[in-house]
């Protein structure tokens, strides 16, 4: 599912992901993913990188087949090389129509309903759990068909960080329900309540919810300009795997590059991190001066 497909149509080569998980193990960064982000920011700042936060790029200025500046309202940033890690489709909408990607043939990965819970009580779960509830295939079919899942045939994932990180002062749970992108708004709370009830029954956990934040496909679209509310970008179909994913280099503009989950090598935090390494080397080796 995190590859943007189902076990019924995902290329078999991705079985290697299972080996990576079960054969080599999964690593947890100290402090969670925020700890990873902090380490990356610190490393960048030591290298002289300057971060400017809370500026939404809304215009790209192009001259002589090169990006000369990007704008956020009245703020203008110039440069020699531009790397976009914003949503690829959103970046496309800022470019002239005649040099945009053809999105009509692209298959998107799922979106998600996320529930962030702060809880008190007894939790009996591992760090990562996938719960198959009802008919597994019917849930995947709903994603392919672009309709909300049937609450009675709906599988989900749960993260319980404290199972690994005992330094956390409280207990928190994250529930993830995969859903199709580009859905009309519906009552997400019904789905969240169903999976919490099922989780308690299956794990014999007993807890009270002290904090709850539900994050919906609409939030992905609003907060991150995610195309049609997708949570993961492009699906890993055979036609969108490896060299068939969206290009890292804009073929019309000499100094514009892309990084992230839409391009190579693909979806997921490790893959996106590798994407930045591949692209940085490509830029270093490029003839752009």
Image: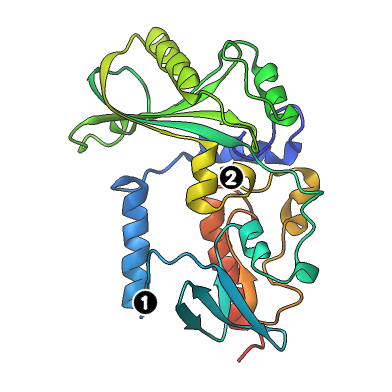
Q: Quadrant of residue 99?
A: bottom right
Q: Image check: 117 left or right of 101? A: left
Task: Determine whether the residue tagged by mark 2 lies in a helix, strand or loop.
Answer: loop
Residue farthest toward the bottom in the current orientation of the protein = 289
Residue lying at 42% horizontally and 15% vertically, measured from the top left: 199
Residue farthest toward the front in the current orientation of the protein = 74
First in sequence: mark 2 or mark 1? 1
Q: Position of residue 115 (x, y in %)?
A: 41, 30
Number of numbered discs on residues: 2
Residues packed near mark 2 inside 10 Å, few (<14), some (14 to 19) or many (20 plus): many
Residue bearing mark 1: 50
Q: Image check: 251 left or right of 30? A: right
Could you give the CA–CA distance between mark 2 and mark 1, rounded to whole angstroms? 27 Å
Residue 6 to residue 150: above or below: below
Residue bearing mark 2: 232
Q: Quadrant of residue 88?
A: bottom right
Q: Position of residue 214 (x, y in %)?
A: 41, 32
Task: Determine whether the residue tagged by mark 1 lies in a helix, strand or loop.
Answer: loop
Residue lying at 37% horizontally and 43% vertically, measured from the top left: 28
Can residue 128 be seen in the rendering of this structure? no
Q: Position of residue 166 (x, y in %)?
A: 22, 34
Pick whichever, 124 or 190, lies toward us: 190
Q: Quadrant of residue 83?
A: bottom right
Q: Position of residue 18 (x, y in %)?
A: 59, 35
């Amino acid at each position: 599912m995190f590859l943007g497909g189902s076990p019924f149509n995902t290329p078999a080569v991705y079985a290697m992901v299972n080996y990576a998980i079960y054969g080599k193990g999964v690593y947890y960064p100290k402090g969670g993913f925020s700890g990873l982000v902090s380490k990356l920011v610190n490393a960048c700042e030591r290298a002289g990188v300057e971060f400017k936060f809370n500026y939404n790029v809304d215009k790209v200025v192009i001259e002589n087949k090169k990006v000369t500046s990007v704008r956020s309202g009245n703020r203008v940033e110039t440069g020699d090389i531009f790397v976009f890690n914003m949503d690829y489709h959103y970046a496309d909408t800022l470019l002239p129509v005649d040099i945009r990607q053809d999105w009509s043939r692209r298959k998107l990965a799922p979106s998600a309903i996320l529930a962030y819970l702060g809880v008190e009580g007894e939790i009996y779960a591992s760090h990562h759990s996938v719960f198959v509830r009802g008919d597994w295939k019917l849930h995947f079919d709903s994603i392919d068909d672009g309709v909300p899942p049937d609450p009675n045939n709906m599988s989900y994932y749960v993260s319980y960080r404290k199972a690994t990180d005992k330094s956390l002062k409280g207990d928190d749970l994250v529930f993830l329900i995969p859903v199709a992108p580009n859905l009309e708004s519906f009552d997400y709370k019904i789905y969240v309540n169903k999976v919490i009830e099922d989780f308690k029954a299956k794990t014999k956990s007993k807890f009270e919810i002290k904090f709850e934040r539900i994050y919906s496909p609409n939030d992905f679209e609003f907060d991150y300009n995610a195309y049609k509310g997708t949570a993961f970008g492009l699906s890993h179909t055979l036609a969108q795997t490896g060299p068939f994913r969206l290009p890292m280099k804009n073929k019309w503009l000499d100094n514009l590059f892309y990084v992230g989950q839409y391009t190579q090598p693909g979806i997921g935090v490790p893959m996106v991190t590798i994407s930045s390494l591949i692209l940085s080397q490509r830029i270093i080796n490029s003839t752009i001066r």
